[in-house]
Amino acid sequence: IASHIAELEQFIKENKVIAVGEIGLDYYWDDSNKERQLIFFEEQLKLANRLSLPVIVHDRDAHADTLELLKKYNPKGVVHCFSGSVEMAKEVIKLGMYIGVGGVVTFKNAKKLVEVVRETPISRILLETDAPYMAPEPNRGKTCHSGYISYTANKIAEIKSMDIQDVIDTCANNTRELFKIK
């Protein structure tokens, strides 16, 4: 593990890297090696903190372990393609992190994510595509790309009773702030 982290650190230092990610935990698959994932995620969080870089966190069916490690290391960053509860979102926001929202929010069965968006300040939301997967309605099942992001922004605007341009502008500013983009 140490050699992989050293290699990653060397790559980061030699290139114009603005974040460490996508890193995290994925317990969806029955054969996932949870112990190994936990070790790598923890080491990647340490690396990001050491290099003062934000993280892009992957969390699939691993909410408790993900939140535990985020609380332990308190990185800057975003929980990408957020799928947790409102309570988890509130904990992530307390850490100063962002909630990544993609096309899933437009799905008919996205009740939990709609509630997360409703309860999350727009100042803590990032728009995402998660390309090539999870294209928003009405393009569900197609290859996702950034050209579809307006569907996600529109749904967020609807949920939050906001103007779509305000959602786009605020989320763009959030992205620039997190990744230090001028």
Image (cartoon, rainbow, N blue to C red):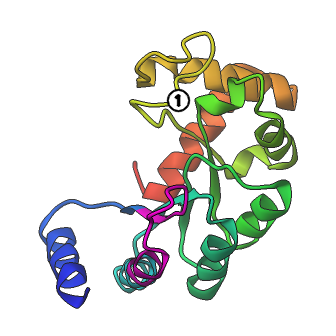
Q: In the rendered image, is residue 165 in sight?
A: no
Residue 117 x/y as whole percent: 79, 41
In the rendered structure, the answer to whether residue 90 lies left or right of residue 59 reads: right
Which residue shows up at 54% across the image and 62% down it? 27
Residue 50 x/y as whole percent: 37, 86
Of 47 and 96, nearer the camera is: 47
Q: Quadrant of residue 102?
A: top right
Instruction: Residue under label 1, please give it.
Output: 134
Which residue shows up at 15% across the image and 70% down it? 11
Does the segment drawn in magenta span residue 61?
no
57 to 12, vertically: above or below: above
129 to 85, vertically: above or below: above
Q: In the rendered image, is residue 22 in sight?
A: yes
In the rendered structure, the answer to whether residue 178 lies left or right of residue 146 reads: right
In the rendered structure, the answer to whether residue 51 lies left or right of residue 37 reads: left
- In the structure shown, which secondary structural element does the residue marked by tag 1 occupy? loop
Residue 83 x/y as whole percent: 68, 49
Q: Quadrant of residue 95?
A: bottom right
Which residue shows up at 80% across the image and 55% down it? 85
Q: Residue furthest top?
A: 138
Q: Which residues are magenta?
A: 23-40
In the rendered structure, the answer to whether residue 146 lies left or right of residue 80 reads: left
